[in-house]
Amino acid sequence: MERIVLVRHAKAMDREAWELDDLSRPLLPKGHKRAEGLAELLVKRYPSIDAIFASPAIRTKETAQSIARAFPAAPLVLAEEILPDSGIVGYSKLLEQASIKGHKEIVVVGHEPDLSETVSMLCSNGRIHLHWKKAAFVELVMDGEGIWRIEAMIPASFF
């Protein structure tokens, strides 16, 4: 794998106001709009995405569906490995599976703090600490020595 674009899901219903299972929280209209803007930016920056992976939680699925519409050739895969609180273990499993399948460039739509933890472990053995807002993304690129590095971190306010 050469490039991973890690995306935090767009703005969803407030957790405290939602009375049903947390995994069923949908995006707000503002979240849908941000997800569409995110998709437009991603297709301009990364025209050759091989696959899109998302947590099965409704808010990540809806964010990923917006992205998938911009990449009709890339399959959208719902991955239970990256449900909320799966941590680096779940993300590592997913990335290994994507690599085995021969994917070079992927988008992964997930949750905080798992995304930050994953970036920290992949890029610095846990020495950096990130936190990003909803619908923002981080691009990781594999360098010539097989080390992941942060290429870009784009806030949702950019699009």
Image (cartoon, rainbow, N blue to C red):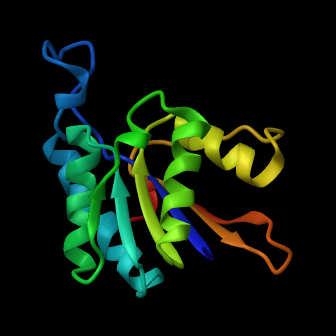
Q: Percent from the top left, x then y, of residue 113? A: 54, 32
Compared to residue 113, the image places residue 79 above or below, namely below
**Image label count:** 0
In depth, the one of 94 and 117 nearer the eye is: 94
Q: Looking at the rendering, which quadrant does residue 126 occupy?
A: top right
Q: Percent from the top left, x then y, of residue 73? A: 26, 83
Residue 113 can be seen, yes or no? no
**Drawn side of residue 83 relative to residue 112, left or right:** left
Q: Residue at x 13, y 46 (%)?
A: 29
Q: Residue at x 35, y 65 (%)?
A: 52
Q: Percent from the top left, x then y, of residue 145? A: 86, 75
**Drawn side of residue 153 relative to residue 76, left or right:** right
Compared to residue 121, the image places residue 97 above or below, namely below
Q: Quadrant of the N terminus?
A: bottom right
Compared to residue 154, the image places residue 87 above or below, namely above
Q: Percent from the top left, x then y, of residue 22? A: 24, 22
In depth, the one of 95 and 11 nearer the eye is: 95
Q: Quadrant of the C terminus?
A: bottom left
